[in-house]
Image (cartoon, coloured by chain):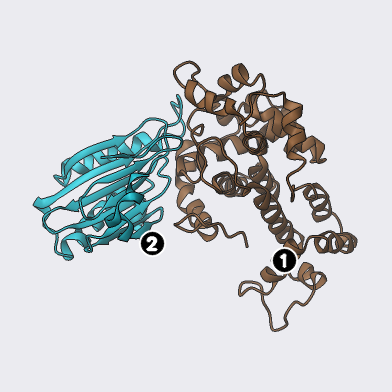
Chain colours: A brown, B cyan
Amino acid sequence: MKSAADLQTVVEMTRSIPCAPAILPKLLKLAEGSSSDLGEMEMLINLDTGLATDVLRTANSAYFASNQRCENISDAILRLGSKVLYRIAASTLTGRWLVHPVRGYGWEPGDLCRHSLCVAICAETFAKKMQIADSATAYTAGLIHDLGKFALAYANFTALDEIANRVPDEFPTWREAEKAILGFESTEVTKALLENWGFPSTFVSVGYYYQIPSEAPEEERKIVTLIHAAKHVATQLGYGVGVDGFYYEPDEVALKEAGFKDAEMDAAIPEILATIQRFISPTGEIRFT
Amino acid sequence: MASSLNPVAEQMQTIVVGVADFKISTEPSTYIVTHSLGSCLGITFYDDKRRIGGLLHAMLPASPQVQGQKIREAMFLDTGIPKLLSALIRSGAKKHDIRCKVFGGAQLMTADSFFRIGSKNIDMFYRLSQELELDVVSWEVSGRVNRSIRLNNLTGDVIVKIPSKPEFIR
């Protein structure tokens, strides 16, 4: 275990983790583009054997299969469409990164991945219902919103234990304790990682502001607030929530401004739960595709 | 964990209850487990004379009153608790011998208008416990912790796990 280090050290340490979701921004751009980008998409997917396998498996699953089997990525792309393909890529690549066993936040192995998946599904559901963001973007933003915490846990700081020991007696919120003890917040780590990987500014803003959406730039405030809402609903659901989970303040002003209503969010929970349970078993196993 | 040093505990089989589900067991050498309650409630029922136990993991307080709408009864306290009680009684438990314990209902920070599922669940459980005359012997609810629970069907003890803390028994 190490004592506190600076933000840049944390970011540098995560460079050694394999399978970082660094090709996601490129895939996102291609998924939004024209059919002429399909060749490039195929090339990117083929670079990653695990991802290519997941794409082919999904294309040949009972849900998507037709009379003809998909034998290659090119056919799979045509069958699945770029949106579905992107969703598979986002889940596979981010999930693979997030399931690295790390210590911190009282997590059991896979907890951050379970929680991030729940946030993604809540965000996707609210995006569709409220039409305040593209659902694929919301889903990805949910998956990556807390990458900085993963990086901190990976860096294995004793300072994380100190934060846990001093919240709530000395610091009412986890954010305040991070600032005082680490000298920076986990959201700053998320921002630095996403910027390093070339993620679009929307995702960087989500990672940096999702705890305080009122402070987000106006043009990105809606999706940041969406992730804020999704985060809190997912926390209530419990999946993968660590020792920090209930020590964040809801930003009621931003939620009201974006049109969120408590009763409507509660009413969406049965649908959200049904989706979550397609991907997470009662014992906690995660299945992305 | 102390339980792993206990030869009896090592022979216990485990039944896992997902969110919006319940399970019962008439087999004493069984743990009934549910993970990560968050703001949900985990409610155990145990007839210690017959060693019949059950566990419900309910997410929301009240089922929607929409004609013809199919619901998952175990998702809601108002439908899940009667359903679990009936299942236990059908399996041989006696209502007057059933003791109940309740866990979960974690609450987010000062949220006047949002994210109040934890407190709504606790209020509803309190109301239902009066209406159904439940013998509630343990309340481990509210607070800002994510609880996982394990009912020992041999003893009726419930082992509680919260992140970064040692397990304890209720």
Note whether A157 is above or below A50 in the view shown.
above
Instruction: Same chain for labels 2 and 1? Say yes or no.
Output: no
Mark 2, residues whose alpha carbon is within 10 Å: few (<14), some, or many (≥20)? few
Residue A114 % position (x, y): 55, 49
Image quadrant where one finds the N terminus of chain B: top left
Q: CA distance from mark 2 to mark 1?
A: 34 Å
Mark 1, residues whose alpha carbon is within 10 Å: few (<14), some, or many (≥20)? many
Q: Is residue B96 left or right of residue A106?
A: left
Task: Decide if residue B76 is in sight here.
Answer: no
Q: Nearer the viewer, residue B104 or A213?
A: B104
Secondary structure, mark 2, is loop
Q: Chain of mark 1?
A: A
The residue wearing badge 1 is: A55
Note whether A122 is above or below B31 in the view shown.
above
Q: Is residue A172 left or right of residue A221?
A: left
Which disc number belongs to residue B22?
none
Q: Nearer the viewer, residue A162 or A72?
A: A162
What amino acid is at disc 2?
Lys
Residue A198 % position (x, y): 83, 40
Note whether A160 is above or below B69 in the view shown.
above
The residue wearing badge 2 is: B70
Give the residue at x 69% y 24%: A5
Figure quadrant of residue B121: top left
What amino acid is at disc 1?
Val
Residue A222 % position (x, y): 66, 35
Give the residue at x 28% y 47%: B43
Give the residue at x 48% y 24%: A165
